[in-house]
Image: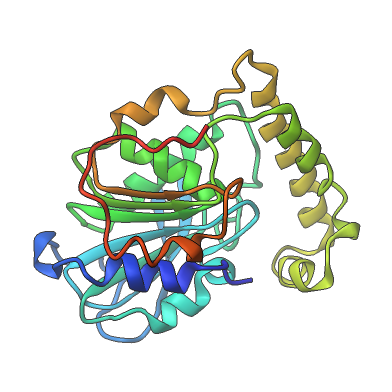
């Protein structure tokens, strides 16, 4: 399932950037150049992480999928249609998702921080010195944390459908998707094909439990305290507000301010 608004976000927000602004060293041995899409695994933090890579541009961009998603399910169209002369695109499967299994996906209290470290370490293992992040949903939260914790490595940041805290209303919404049998066939089918029904259903329930635990804190905090540490130019759109695409007429490039996004 492709992420809504992703193609327009990439086109309008990334293409105006100068590809010469981010130096890029050669990629790892598993990756290839040109317009083909490489699918490979590389060991990072004790896990064989799956990634797809395409393009030969000097601006590296990591695509971070949402809950239960993978690079292919969430960003398949972007892997095919991005300008591959300007960009080198990497789409990853976080541990326990997509083809980064084993291990099975779990949700300890620090699972977002773990994903952020995995994502950054993956890009470093692929020999990228600096790169931009484009994250949606859980991938957006991961991107916020990565940009805050590893500011020297992150060039630009695009995030949508993400939140830095969890409210009781959020928990109500999360519990509404706990039972995957109630999901629409369009959304459910590709995930069942990728995982099988049992793993899909079990992991969805575990995700609801994991994300809901943040609401037990007095402020529901996920990463709110990290946001002031984000220094790179950032474009942010909350799922609570309006579709990402509706902001594109106002955003032709990443904003240059170092002010952290308000995504409470």
Residue lying furthest top in this view?
218
Q: How is the image coloured?
A: rainbow
Q: Nearer the viewer, residue 36 or 261?
A: 261
Quadrant in which residue 105 is drawn: top right
Q: Is residue 30 visible?
A: no
Q: Nearer the viewer, residue 170 or 190?
A: 170
Residue at figure coordinates x 26%, y 72% from the top left: 15
1 shown above or below 237: below
Picture coordinates of residue 264 (x, y %)? 52, 31
Instruction: Please state if 122 lies on the left or on the right of 190 as rendered.
Output: left
Residue at figure coordinates x 28%, y 78% from the top left: 55
Picture coordinates of residue 72 (x, y %)? 54, 71
Quadrant in which residue 182 is drawn: bottom right
Q: Quadrant of the N terminus?
A: bottom right
Quadrant in which residue 20 is drawn: bottom left
Residue lying furthest front in this view?
250
Picture coordinates of residue 36 (x, y %)? 36, 86
Picture coordinates of residue 179 (x, y %)? 88, 50
Residue lying furthest bottom in this view?
35
């Amino acid at each position: 399932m492709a992420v809504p608004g992703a193609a327009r976000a990439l086109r309008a927000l990334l293409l105006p950037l100068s590809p010469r602004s981010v130096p890029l060293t050669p990629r790892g041995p598993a990756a290839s150049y040109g317009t083909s899409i490489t699918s490979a695994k590389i060991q990072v933090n004790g896990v064989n992480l799956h990634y797809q890579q395409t393009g030969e541009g000097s601006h590296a961009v990591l695509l971070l999928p949402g809950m239960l998603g993978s690079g292919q399910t969430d960003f398949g169209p972007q892997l095919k249609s991005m300008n591959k002369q300007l960009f080198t695109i990497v789409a990853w499967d976080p541990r326990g998702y997509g083809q980064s299994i084993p291990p099975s996906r779990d949700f300890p209290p620090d699972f977002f921080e773990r994903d952020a470290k995995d994502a950054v370490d993956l890009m470093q293992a692929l020999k990228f010195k600096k790169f931009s992040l484009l994250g949606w949903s859980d991938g957006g939260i991961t991107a916020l944390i990565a940009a805050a914790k590893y500011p020297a490595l992150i060039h630009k940041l695009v995030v949508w459908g993400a939140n830095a805290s969890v409210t009781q209303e959020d928990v109500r919404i999360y519990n509404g998707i706990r039972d995957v049998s109630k999901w629409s066939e369009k959304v459910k089918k590709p995930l069942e094909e990728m995982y099988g029904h049992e793993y899909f259903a079990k992991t969805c329930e575990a995700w609801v439990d994991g994300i809901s635990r943040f609401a037990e804190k007095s402020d529901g905090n996920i990463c709110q305290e990290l946001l002031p540490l984000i220094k790179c130019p950032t474009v942010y759109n909350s799922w609570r507000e309006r579709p990402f695409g509706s902001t594109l007429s106002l955003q032709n490039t990443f904003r240059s301010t170092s002010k952290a996004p308000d995504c409470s």
